[in-house]
Image (cartoon, rainbow, N blue to C red):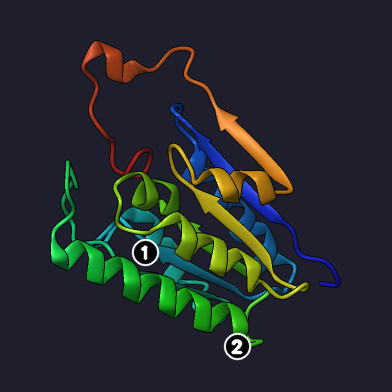
Amino acid sequence: MEKGYIQVYTGNGKGKTTAALGLTLRAAGAGLRVYIAQFMKKGHYSEIRALERLSDQVTVEQFGTGRFVLGKPDPEDLEAGRKGLAAAGQAMLSGEYDMVVLEEANVAYESKIISERDLMDFVSAKPDGVELVLTGRGGAPGVLERADLITEMKPVRHYFEQGVGARTGIES
């Protein structure tokens, strides 16, 4: 890729991670290599099982602690965020990947696991030929200012409001 852009998928609606995974699938289909850093997840989600089939083109690493971060993050959460950003930075600068996805990086920022300064340093280091995708509710103002594309997912109606929980293969 000659020019890679910065894409942000944010908002309170469903579909932010799904959009990034759709881009991943499209990129892999075009022969591009993708690195995904999951900042809040830990465990074997359905998308992980599917992406394992594309392991020659898609690398997924999880840096979440597997719990919700409310209030002040624990030292373990902060360390996981640092490790995730460092690993994603290495991947981005390695020349091995055409696209880097920071899944739930916006949530990690909003939860104070990753600082705006660290995210801005990451974005500033992006090589021209790498597409960078950040997902999650919210987002660091500086990153949003630098983004080339921002899509805000807006909820209109969701069956969760009728008590339907996350369904395997659809939400998890």
Q: Nearer the viewer, residue 6 or 156?
A: 6
Residue 94 bears which disc, if any? 2
Residue 140 bears which disc, if any? none
* Callout 2: SS: loop
| 77 to 150, vertically: above or below | below
Badge 2 crowding class, 10 Å Cα cut-off, few under 14, some 14 to 19, many 20 or more, is few
Find the distance from the CA under tag 2 to the CA under tag 1.
25 Å
- Looking at the picture, which amino acid does disc 1 mark? Arg
What residue would you read off at disc 1?
49
Which picture quadrant has residue 138?
A: top left
Image coordinates of residue 155 in percent, x first then y, are: 47, 19
Name the residue at 77% across, 72% down: 128
Name the residue at 48% across, 74% down: 88
Name the residue at 40% across, 56% down: 47
Q: How many marks?
A: 2
Please state, as top left, top right, bottom left or bottom right, where the N terminus lies in the image: bottom right
Which picture quadrant has residue 122?
A: bottom right
Name the residue at 70% across, 73% down: 32
| 60 to 39, vertically: above or below | below
Image coordinates of residue 72 in percent, x first then y, are: 17, 48
- Looking at the picture, which amino acid does disc 2 mark? Ser
The mark lying in front, picked from 2 and 1, is 2
Q: Earlier in the sequence, mark 2 or mark 1?
A: 1
* Callout 1: SS: helix
